[in-house]
């Protein structure tokens, strides 16, 4: 293991995806004197947008809310392809000098807090299998919320007997030839809905096999109002106005879905019926849950429904009995011939990128800790993590949390404090809220036992109400009577 050399970093950021790049850019803009590095396990930045390379991969929310508040989205399409999003992130990183701070090929495996020194010792593994350690005052986990190595295995009977390729979108082989092939995509979520129209462009046939239907909403890939504003206003003004418009509209739609689910269901069914015409079959588009009890699947320009209407793709609803060498047999005795099977069956959650975190050598079980201010954790010093919105653009929380952390760091510098710990006394009882906020998505339900706790009120809360969160994070004082500030017991000098 490499020896630790040099002074400790002020901040170590784990992950160079949307979250890590976002905090890095905010630090450059608001805390220019603070030293930081970004550890990224992959050889490119981008996180999700570098990992997922399946055909048609794109955003599942508009880029005016998925983009950063300080960096206008300038592309004509608001629903963007993965490569365009990756280019945007690379531009943000370059504009803020982040490439020189990113250490590629470093997968963080553990972090241990040394209370005697007021420092984290972070152990990482390089791509060649060697290990190293780095010391940092503060650690921020921007590693996303799902396991990048091990996607969810739906345990489909007989899948190993299939004679052709079996592909999971998380590990899509770039040399896979699906032209002229019969493809069955198992799943009905955002990934399946994206894959099907892309595959249908050249495959002989594409079947989306769903065990449970999903709610879909269609939206133009180009925001006409945004593009009009860009022609008459400076880019930053146009971007800010469009971002405000889209967050408000989305918030109104979600609240209406919760108040009047049957009305929203009729609207969504009407959209699909208008798209499909005679090909519309209500059973394929009527989930056993209300709209926004799971994330709605966004269908830009109705591309999925165009492929179905044109006969290039179809939806089959049924339960799988078994897979054999030639295809998939359903419980109702139907058989789906296939040359390629794609298992778009979901993701598996990972807390803090599966990093082993400990305090003075004692492992931290985050399921026993409460969120604090949407990012930190009760009784865990100098550590934050990002869990984005399930009902809005992920980056909305990135900007909000990054701004708050920069306020925290600035205040700590003014007071000459090095350690900040949200203190929750053992005898302080909090009323817990369901951390899943009424969402019934399988990947959330399967992993709820791993997730940190959330109270019904701030500061011990992770909510899904962006506007309430934004107001609370802006107005709440840093010294709120909960956060305990300390000077590091021993300032560590360079070795």
Image (cartoon, grey):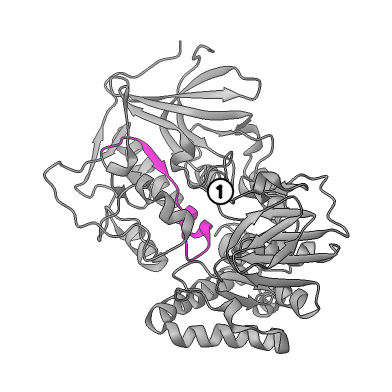
Give above or below for 253 relative to 97.
below
**In the image: residue 456, left or right of residue 206:** left
Instruction: Give coordinates of residue 164: x percent, y percent.
Output: 78, 48
- In the image, 422: left or right of 16? left
Q: Residue furthest right?
A: 180
Q: Nearer the viewer, residue 457 or 98?
A: 457
Residue 47: image quadrant is: top right
- The correct choice, above or below, for 392 with respect to 36 in the image is below
Residue at 79% from the left image edge and 45% from the top image edge: 174
Residue 384 on the magenta segment = yes
Residue 239 showing in the rendered view? yes
Crowd band around label 1 with a 10 angstrom C-alpha radius: few (<14), some (14–19), many (20+):
few
Q: Quadrant of residue 63?
A: bottom right
Q: Residue at x 33, y 40 (%)?
A: 366
**Viewer-side residue, 402 vs 281:** 281
* Residue 208 x, y percent position in the rendering: 68, 66
Residue pictured at 60% horizontal, 59% vertical: 321
Residue sitting nearer the eye, 141 or 239: 141
The answer to whether residue 80 of the structure is visible from this angle is no
Q: Nearer the viewer, residue 356 or 480?
A: 356
Q: In this figure, which residue is indicated by the disc labeled 1?
A: 155
Q: Position of residue 319 (x, y in %)?
A: 57, 64
Q: What residue range appears in magenta?
A: 379-399
Locate residue 201 relative to residue 372 in the image: left or right.
right
Q: Is residue 228 above or below residue 324?
A: below
Please provide percent x and percent y for residue 95: 66, 46
Residue 180 versus residue 232 in the image, above or below: above
- Asked whether residue 364 is drawn in magenta, I would say no
Q: Is residue 357 left or right of residue 489?
A: right
């Amino acid at each position: 293991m490499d020896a630790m050399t040099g002074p400790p970093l002020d901040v170590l950021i784990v992950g160079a995806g949307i979250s890590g790049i976002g905090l890095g850019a905010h630090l450059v803009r608001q805390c220019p004197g603070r030293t930081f590095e970004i550890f990224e396990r992959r050889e490119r930045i981008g996180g999700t947008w570098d990992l997922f390379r399946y055909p048609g991969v794109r955003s599942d929310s508009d880029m005016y809310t998925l983009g950063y508040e300080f960096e206008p989205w300038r592309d004509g399409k608001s629903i963007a392809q993965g490569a365009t999003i990756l280019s945007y992130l690379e531009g943000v990183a370059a504009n803020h000098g982040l490439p020189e701070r990113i250490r590629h090929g470093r997968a963080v495996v553990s972090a241990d807090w040394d209370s005697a020194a007021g420092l984290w010792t972070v152990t990482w593994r390089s791509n060649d299998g060697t290990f190293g350690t780095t010391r940092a005052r503060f650690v921020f986990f921007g590693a996303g919320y799902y396991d990048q190595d091990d996607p969810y295995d739906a345990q489909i009977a007989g899948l190993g007997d299939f004679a052709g390729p079996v592909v999971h979108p998380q590990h899509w082989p770039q040399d896979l030839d699906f032209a002229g092939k019969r493809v069955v995509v198992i799943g009905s979520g955002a990934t399946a809905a994206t894959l099907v129209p892309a595959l249908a462009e050249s495959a002989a046939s594409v079947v989306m096999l769903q065990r449970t239907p999903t709610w879909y909403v269609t939206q133009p890939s180009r925001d006409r109002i945004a593009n009009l504003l860009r022609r008459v206003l400076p880019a930053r003004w146009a971007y800010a106005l469009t971002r405000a418009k889209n967050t408000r509209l989305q918030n109104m739609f979600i609240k209406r879905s919760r108040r009047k689910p049957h009305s929203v269901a009729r609207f969504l069914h009407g959209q699909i019926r208008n798209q499909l015409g005679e090909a519309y079959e209500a059973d394929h588009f009527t989930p056993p849950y209300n709209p926004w009890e799971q994330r709605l699947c966004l269908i830009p320009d109705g591309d999925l429904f165009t492929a179905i209407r044109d006969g290039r793709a179809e939806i089959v609803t049924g339960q799988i009995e078994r897979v054999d060498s030639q295809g998939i047999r359903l419980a109702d005795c139907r058989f789906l011939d296939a040359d390629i099977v794609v298992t778009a069956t979901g993701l598996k959650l990972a807390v803090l990128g599966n990093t082993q975190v400990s305090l003075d050598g004692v492992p931290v079980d985050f399921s026993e800790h409460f969120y604090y201010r949407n990012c930190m954790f009760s009784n865990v010093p100098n550590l934050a993590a990002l869990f984005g919105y399930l009902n809005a653009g992920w980056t909305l929380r990135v900007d909000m949390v990054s701004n708050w952390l920069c306020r925290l760091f600035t205040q700590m510098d003014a007071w000459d404090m090095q350690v900040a710990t949200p203190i929750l006394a053992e005898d302080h009882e909090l009323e817990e809220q369901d951390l899943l906020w009424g969402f019934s998505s399988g990947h959330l339900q399967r992993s709820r036992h791993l997730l940190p706790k959330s109270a019904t009120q701030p500061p011990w809360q992770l909510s899904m109400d962006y506007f309430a969160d934004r107001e609370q994070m802006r107005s709440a004082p840093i010294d709120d009577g909960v956060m305990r500030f300390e000077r590091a017991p021993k300032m560590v000098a360079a070795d």
